[in-house]
Amino acid sequence: MTESELTVDFHKDAPRQGPGSTEETIRALELTGMANNDDLKIADIGCGTGSHTIVLAQNTEVYIVGVDLFPGFLDKLEHKAKALGLQDRVTTLAKSMDNLPFGNNEFDIIWSEGAIYNMGFEAGVKKWKNYLKPGGYICVSEITWITGSRPGELEDFWMREYPEVARASTKINFLEDNGFTLAGYFYLNQDSWIDNYYKPMEERFSAFLKRHNNSEIAEEIVKEYKSEIAHYQKYKDYFSYGFYIARKDT
């Protein structure tokens, strides 16, 4: 199996493919003021196996398109939606987030938890804005500094990994400069990283390695995730995902 296939295998049965929580998804949804509207359409871009897609479907009566690059994740989402009787309102689309077949003004909400970094916050906001109706909302969680200063080692790391990391004010200014009005902002708490994402991840390491006969690629994947966990544990007071909820200006 390729590294990409092994990564999908590692994550496909996980409760989440990234930090977050049901409570934070609902909080962001409520900040749009659209939770009680029935005649809406949402695109959940980078949905993974649909942890937040399902939460959105369970807390609205809207139509949701779950978008992800990996069909293996979407198969899991389809199975969950059917088991919960949500299959008439949840559909899936296997596409790259930077090459979507959506039309202008097609959606009321563009949703993306912990995934927009794959194409970059600025590029994603500019591209996905076209898919939103005037007055529609973009709701995205994005890596964000949560302190005014931070260790140089940490700053150097993120400058290499994702140079768009910034304070919330920088992200908000960008949204406002590109035709959005902020409706709300908050950052994910540490439990959303540790209890909801990293602890379940650690519990899967042994079975994953055994399933793939401790192959070199599998061991490298586990090593990288262990490093990621240690990095977060060391610097968790300085960064998180900021959740940005903004309305497209009419």
Image: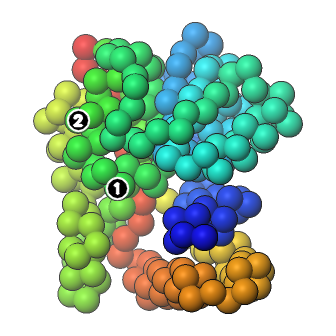
Give how far apart the Cα atoms at labels 2 and 1 are: 13 Å
Find disc 2 in the rendering and name its residue.
126
Find disc 1 in the rendering and name its residue.
117
Which quadrant does the N terminus fall into? bottom right
Residue in the image at 83% along x and 28% along y:
85
Earlier residue among tags 2 and 1: 1
Say whether residue 103 is left or right of residue 68.
left
Task: Give how far across and how far down residue 16 sits, in percent.
Answer: 64, 58
In the image, farthest residue toward the front: 1
Residue in the image at 37% along x and 70% along y:
239
In the image, farthest residue toward the left: 177
Disc 2 crowd, CA 10 A, few/some/many (<14, 14-19, 20+): some
Q: Is residue 119 above or below residue 132?
A: below
Residue in the image at 78% along x and 40% along y:
79
Q: Is residue 222 visible?
A: no
Task: Give how far across and how far down residue 30 sits, in percent.
Answer: 54, 33
Residue 244 occupies quadrant = top left
Disc 1 crowd, CA 10 A, few/some/many (<14, 14-19, 20+): some
Q: Is residue 170 visible?
A: yes
Residue in the image at 42% along x and 43% along y:
96
Label 2 sits on a secondary structure element that is helix
What amino acid is found at the position of numbered circle 1 in the picture? Tyr
28 vs 52, nearest the viewer: 52
Label 1 sits on a secondary structure element that is helix
